[in-house]
Amino acid sequence: MKESIKISVLSVVIGSIQMIIFLPDGYSCIDGKRDIISGIFYFMPIQFCVVFVYSIIFKPFQKSIAKYFLLLIILIFWLYCNKIEFVHRYACWSTYLEEEINKIVLYNSIIPCISCIISFYVGMFYFEKR
């Protein structure tokens, strides 16, 4: 239980950093008026719950495949959050096709997602060895 809470909190901290890096001006556009903190408070509790339940059920410290699957789940969630933010911030003001939106979000998410997923993996490794 303690490990599950540590992993979940770590995922929220690093996920918040990922959102801060991805959002260019520090504004979340869920409704067009809020700041980055509102976006973090909107998305990160969902991530916390998913990671917490997953880590209780599958024990990622005991099974390496479960650890990598958790990384994949988090990466997909971050890409989903980035797509939502991009659609509400830019795509609603222009004529983007769905394929263009996906390409732009993937391209702009490469640096934040890769650096944060590596940080999350290192953090998990640190907690595993403690």
Image (cartoon, rainbow, N blue to C red):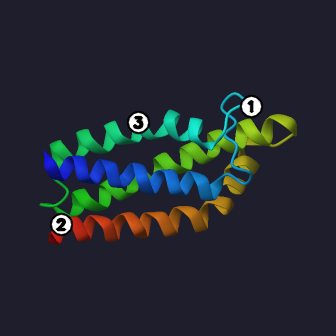
Residue placed under numbered mark 1 in the picture: 32
Q: Which residue is drawn at 56% across and 43% down?
A: 81
Disc 3 residue type (three-letter): Pro
> Left of 97 or right of it: where is 85?
left
Closer-to-camera residue (113/101): 113
Disc 3 vs disc 1: Cβ atoms closer than 8 Å?
Answer: no
Name the spot of residue 44 as percent of width and height, x first: 45, 41
Which quarter of the rendering shows the N terminus? top left
Residue 24 in sight: yes
The image quarter in which residue 123 lies = bottom left
Quadrant (top left/top right/bottom left/bottom right) for the C terminus: bottom left
SS for tag 1?
Answer: loop
Which residue occupies the foreground of this view, 78 or 9?
9
Q: Find disc 2 in the rendering and name its residue.
A: 128
Residue beneath disc 3: 45
Could you tell me which secondary element the residue under label 2 belongs to? helix
Q: Which mark is first along the chain, 1 or 2?
A: 1
